[in-house]
Each structure stands twice: as structure tokens, then as C-alpha cells.
Image (cartoon, helix red, strand yellow):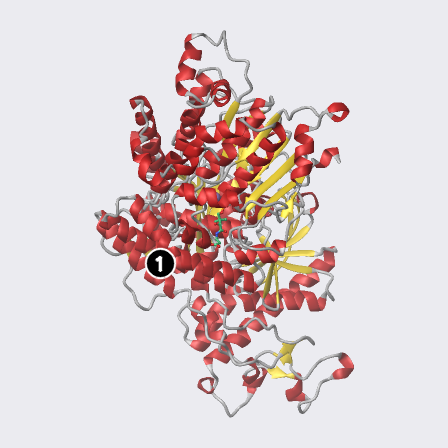
Amino acid sequence: MASELNNSNPDHDYSKEKLKHSSKEEMVSTMTNSMHRSSSRPQLDVSRAAIQEDSEDRNPTILLPNQSDDISHLALDIGGSLIKLVYFSRHEEQSPDDKRRSMKKRFGLSNGNRRSYPILGGRLHFVKFETGKLNECLDFISSKQLHRGGIDSPSWRSGTQTDDNIVIKATGGGAYKFADVLKERLGVSLDKEDEMSCLVAGANFLLKAIRHEAFTHMEGQKEFVQIDHNDMFPYLLVNVGSGVSIIKVDGDGKYQRVSGTNVGGGTFWGLGRLLTKCKNFDELLELSQQGDNSNVDMLVGDIYGGLDYSKIGLSASTIASSFGKTISETKELSDYRPEDISLSLLRMISYNIGQISYLNALRYGLKKIFFGGFFIRGHAYTMDTISFAVHFWSKGQAQAMFLRHEGFLGALGAFMSYEKHGLDYLRAHQLVERFPMEAPCIGGKIHGPPLGNLNEKISWLEKFVQKGTQITAPVPMAPPGTTGMGGFERPSSRGNTLRSDASAALNIGVLHLMPTLEEFPLLADPKMYEPNTIDLLDHGELEYWVTVLSEHLPDLVDKAVASEGGTDDAKRRGDAFAHAFSAHLARLMEEPAAYGKLGLAKLLELREECLREFQFMDAYITIKERENEASLAVLPDLLIELDSMNEEDRLLALIEGVLAANIFDWGSRACVDLYHKGTIIDIYRMSRKKMQRPWRVDDFDMFKEKMLSSGDKKSQPYKRALFFVDNSGADVVLGMLPLARELLRRGTEVVLVANSLPALNDVTALELPEIVAEAAKHCDIIRKAAEAGGLLMDAMVSIQEDGLKNHSTSVSLMVAENGSGGPCIDLRQVSSELAAVAKDADLIILEGMGRAIHTNLNAHFKCDSLKLAMVKNQRLAEKLFNGNIYDCICRFEPGKEQL
Ligand SMILES: CC(C)(COP(=O)(O)O)[C@@H](O)C(=O)NCCC(=O)O
Ligand SMILES: [Mn+2]
């Protein structure tokens, strides 16, 4: 190592190393500010938010009147029991990245096929109300101006749209029944869409567009089912609302209502209300969890003196007659426990629906039965009961599947009939579901004083968070039941993790429509690709990672608050964030599939999203800047030292450098503890010193062969390499950038691929040009390549002045955003910019634990790939590599097409 590198103490020096050019300073500050202002992900606007102060209500009622930014469309499904709303909010803000792109476009510079898209993202929100409380629904629509295209919509601002000519798509019987009320209260007309068509359109959209929409539920186990779009039809759709519709679906718009039953959700609710005095559906469901239906139902054993009727295969615990025991003349209704009645009712109706559905599937030779409608409401016991019935009667030939957006099929279908949204064309990779804290409050009442200032907003969040935490409390264990039906035993999912609907409402987030996301085109087998390495379905794993994140929380909050100057406001938001994120973790511990299929990537991104929700845009900004400066200060010495080596030693030193510098990870508990023990450079030196081959996974020789082979076997240099960079500071400056320089020197174009949004101390695409510009001051190779790639502002101006005539012939160094805002990367959803540059790439380098170990460790690519990371977690090192913390991974794999 060069002497300056060894001796410098950046913790002391870097403050003097301020950027020299004022234009640069302006640029940094503009970049930072615009980043804070304009995230491509929308923020929660809680102004004038109000919470219902009703201690009885487990589902808190929230009013967010100003959260309705740019709402364009609303659709309603007004059923006999519930009103379902789907509404869309649009964001057309130009992100800083777009500014960067359009600037490059202006200068005539392009990164290969790089395309420039307008940001046309939007969000779909799902809300429900009881039909009996229509006024609350209308207040909600009115307060958010949903019927007028939203408070901020152009038509609303310009006053071009009057209430008289507003038309809203609606379906369900209530679209007819309440048309006059809507006209009178909101001045809107309803454009009525056929209910069955809407159900089918909604179901088809969900099955095609949402990756983990459908799932099976047997004996308490939820398993997501990947629907093959080419083999989706025909299927049976059973919509269990107040009544039940059974529809055979043969394609888009091709369906037939083949049957139905009048015994449905309305029957359960109505009879339950009469028999138990429960006030609402959820109360009734919750009551059933403490019930034992054998006190109410007549069992085979009751008839056969406790014996099975084995000749026809019925066990003693089989229900012979639902409610059959209540014929006893000596007992009154008041002698039966409401809990038992409720469970008996639930089982009777669920079995009946399951059985009729199976018979219809049999009639048409169908194997797939999807159940939707709000009767199910994510209730484990209901789903298990229906699944048992289908499984039992079909002898395992037919499969009952449930839908996460079960209750919103009709409303979604009505929404889709607004043609201009083009929702039909969206595919799974363009949809991202997020779970902001306001999502669980769907369908609440609207009242309470409007909140005026920031203080009040935060206290609303605090109140909400308290309520949100409350609703994650588990339902108590019910005593074991005894009965079954039709010869099978009772479903077992009544354990202590069962949820009432109040919390099941958490299961539906806000759907972000991101037309600019694409599947990474270099995946060797996209259908088989699974980003996550660790399986969080394993309860022990989930528990471990949730504990890691919980323990990291105080430190993260400190950093987040400090990143905003430690103000009181930041502290309160920090507290609110900590509570909210803890509530998410608690929810996931109880119900790992609550937010869809859970993986470590999603869990880690949830934390970043939660920070952003509470308006912490970059918790590690100060640390990142400090480490960038410290590392840039020693970069020239490192480059001199590298240049003094022969080719082979240099390549090894470069890879060692990447691995050693990956130790700067503020997300790892062990590493953060290390940082108290020395300066950045001390730690970097120590880390390099410990580099000893063979590494835990060591394919270096294979990579070297590919890079340096000479003589007959001399290989062509790579044409374009994608560098998936990880952390700021030493990681990118002393690790990945020198490696990039080596490839540039060998004639390979390099694209630095970085996060679109901050996550821990990861470097972002927006921050990279500044870092590269600083590095370019000390290195001609980087400078020329950065100029050629359009990364240097000054160079861009001179290129513009030259009219591009004398444009450099040097290979380019470019930057692309990856579309992600988390520390891992799911290559099923990357930015279109990355997808475009990837098409010409023949080498991929994935760096860091998040991108190369937690995710993508087992991913195969069409082109050569190199995965480089230091394992900064003991458990992970043992589990995946039979190794130890700080072991290094260098995995090279030739492209699958070349094998
Ligand atoms: C969040 C991270 C994946 C980031 O690692 P990186 O990708 O920066 O190498 C990693 O820090 C991590 O898994 N941390 C949690 C485990 C721990 O603290 O040991
Ligand atoms: Mn990282």
C-alpha cells in the first residue's frame, strides 16, 4: 500500500478536502436538495389527517383528506353488504434522474440503447365501507375529491369539470339502487358496468399482473401459487359476496355464470346477527374462534352412540346435520353459546360453498377454483374449511385457491373499464405493492378535527401507530374442536396466530404502477429465477432476521434523526418510524405472508420504504459523504500503487480491493461495531491485510483466465460490463472504481449500476457522477471514459460547444439506475434504463452482500457473471458457505448461452 494511504487519517483530514469548484458545490447541493424534494416514490401526505377516538374500534378510522394527490379515477362496486372502492392517484413529477437523462439527450449522448421515459407512475388504492354506512363512503369520496379527479387534478384546478358532467364507473346492485343518492350527494352519474364482466375482468387482471396473487390454504398453511399465464384458462371463479356467483371463465371477456347459491356471506352475517347479537361480520368471525360447534351440530357419533359409521366412511366426529342438536325441546336459544353458534354457522356455509363449487368444477371438468369476495376476508378457518371441502369431495383432483384482493374483483373490473389507464397491458414486473401505514385504515369512518400543522400530523401518526400496534395482537387459542364433515376432520388453523378481519385488512397494500420497470434481460431462465437465497418461510430464519432488524432499529433511528440535524421534528418522526416499522415486523412474525410472499429483499426494502414514508430520504447521507471524501483523498495513491504492478498481480489486487472495501456496510451489526475501533482507512487496511486466498468461494483463477488469457487462447476483451455497485465510500471509490478503470483500460465499456433511491449507505445513481468526477481529477483513464459516457458536466458543455464533432473515441464509463430502493436487488423488476444498457453487456459484476448473497447468489445469466462480496454475518457465513464472518466470496460463472 502506498505511504499516503497508510498514514492518512481521513477522519481528521477530509474536512479540508472540500470540493474546490463552486459550480461543483452548487451541483452537489442541487442534487441533494432535489433528491430530498423529489423521490420517484410518492410520500404520505397526512395534512389535515384525523383519527377516530373510539377505544372500542380495533380498526382505526383515519381521514387523510390531502393524500389524494392527482387522483384521476374512481370505480365502485356497491354490493349488498359492502361498498368497494378502487381509486388511482397519479404522479408526473420529473425526478432528478430524468433531468440527468434529458440533459444527456440534449447533448446527443446516449448510453447504447438507453431510452428516456416520462415517469407515468401511479398508484391504485383499495378501500371498503359497509353498504349500510353509505354516507361514510360518500364523505370519504367527497373529502378526497375522488369523484372530481382529485383536488390537484388539472380539471379541478382549471374548473373545466363541473359536478354535473362527472361520470363514475360502478358495478354491483347498489349502482342501480343508490344511483340517485350519488347524484344528489356528489352530483355524479354512475356508468353501470355488468357485475359478472367486472368480476371476471378483475380476476383476470390480478392473476396475470400480480406475481403472488393466488394462494392455497390448507391446514393453516398458506402457499402462493405461480399462475402460468399461458395455462390460466379455463377456471372456475366463485365470488362469495352476500350471495354466491359461480362463473366458468374461458378467457378475457369469455365467461358464463354457471351457478350460484343464495347461501353466502349475507346469510352468515344475517343469521349470525339474529342468533348471536353480534354487531358486525368481523365480530362474528372472531367469536367463532372461541367456539365448539359440537354443542350445536349433530354429529355422526351423536346418532351412532359415539361410534363411527365406518361402512360409508364417516367418522363419529363428522357433522351429520348442522345445527341438528338445537332441535332439543328442552333448550332455548339463550342456552347455546354464541361462540358455538357462530362457528357452526361458519362451517355450514363454508362447507356448502366448497361442495357446490366442487360439483360445478366437476360438471365442467375444471381443476382450478378461485374463491373471491369479502366473505372470505383472509380468514384462515374459512379458507381451510372451503379447501377441505374441495379437496375431500374431489379426492384431491381440484384445487381451491384464494386471492389476496379477494373483495375487490368487481371494483377493479369496473376500474379497468376506463380504457385510458391501459391497465390490461401492465404485467407483474411493472407493479410494486407497498404497505404504507395508512393502508390498514381502509374503510374507516371519517370524523374528528382536521389537523393543521406538522405537530398535529406527527401526533396523528403516533396515535395511528398505537392503534396499528394494537391490532396486531394475536387472537387467543381456541379449545380443540371435535367435528368434521363428510368424513374429514376439522381444519386445524385455529391456533394462536389467527387473525380477525381488522388485521387482515393490512394484507392489501397500495399498488404502484411503474410502467418503466422491466425484467432484467440477461437472466438465463427468468421463469425459474428466485432472487432470495434464504427462505423466510422457515420460521427460525424469519425470527432471526426480524430480530436483527429490530436490534438495528435504535441505531438506524439515531442516524436518520442525525441526518436531519437532530431536530425535535426529526426525533418525533424517528419515533413514529420506529413504532411503525416494529408494527410491520410484529405483523410479519405472526403472519409471514401478510404482505404477499416474503423474502429478505422485501423485508429489507420495507425498512427503507418505511423510512421514506416518515420523510427520511437518506438516513446515511452524512456518513456517505464523509466516507466518500476520505476515500477519494487516498484514491490517487492507490492508483499509483496498482499501476506499479504487473497485469496479473494488479487484477488480484483489484479483486482483493473490492472484497476488502465491502467491509464498509452500515447495515451489518458486526461491521458497525468495528467502526468504533479505528478510522476508515485503518479498517480498510486491516481488511486488506486479512485477505487470504483461497477465499471461501474462490473462482478468481477462472476470471483471470477470461480476462488475461494470452497466446492462442487470447480472448477478446469484454464489450460492456455492468457493475452493480454497493456502498458509498471505500467500497465504490477504492473497490469498484479501480476495477472499472482496469476494464476501461482494456477496452471494455463500463456501466456503473446503482440504486435509484438510497438504502443504508448504498451509493445511488444520482451520487455517482459527482464521485466519478472527483476520481477523474486524478486519473486520465476515468476522465476520458467519463467524458465519453457523458458523466462530466464540464465535458458535456465542451462537447455541446464542439457540436459533437470531436467526440472522444475512448470507451465510455456510464451510470445507470437500477430501479431499486433497497439494499438487495430483484432482477425481475429493474429500471428500463438498466434493461436497455444490459442488452449489449457481456459481463455482469454483482457486488455486496445484499446484491450478490442475500439475492442473486444462485442466479444464472446469459453472459459471464462475477459475484463479489464479503460475508458480514456469522450465521449467514455458516449456513451458506460453512464458513465464518468476514469470509469472502468470488464466484465466477460463464454465461449460460456459451456453456
Ligand atoms: C443490509 C446488508 C445486506 C447490506 O450489505 P451490503 O450489501 O452493503 O454488503 C447487510 O448489512 C445485512 O445483511 N445486515 C444485516 C445482518 C447483520 O447485521 O449481521
Ligand atoms: Mn450496501
Residue 270 at x, y percent in the picture = 47, 69
Q: Is residue 877 visible?
A: yes
- Is residue 143 toward the left or the right of residue 746 in the image? left
Identify the residue under disc 1: 579
Q: Residue furthest front?
A: 3
Instruction: Name the residue nearer the viewer: 719 or 611.
Output: 719
Residue 150 at x, y percent in the picture = 35, 39
Placement of 310 over or under 49, stated as above or below: below
Instruction: Name the residue nearer the viewer: 832 or 848.
Output: 848
Placement of 666 over or under 781, stated as above or below: below
Residue 648 at x, y percent in the picture = 63, 31
Residue pictured at 26% horizontal, 48% vertical: 566
- Is residue 546 toward the left or the right of residue 701 in the image? left
| Quadrant where the C terminus is found in the figure | top right
Give the residue type at disc 1: His
Q: How many marks?
A: 1
Residue 362 found in image quarter: bottom right
- Is residue 737 toward the left or the right of residue 567 in the image? right
**Dot 1: what SS?**
helix
Disc 1 packing (10 Å; few <14; some 14–19; many ≥20):
many
Q: Is residue 246 visible?
A: no
Placement of 571 over or under 97, stated as above or below: below
Instruction: Name the residue nearer the viewer: 580 or 374.
Output: 580
Residue 543 at x, y percent in the picture = 51, 63
Placement of 494 over or under 419, stated as above or below: below
Residue pictured at 36% horizontal, 42% vertical: 623
The residue carrying mark 1 has its beta carbon less than 8 Å from ligand 1: no
Instruction: Name the residue nearer the viewer: 672 or 559.
Output: 672
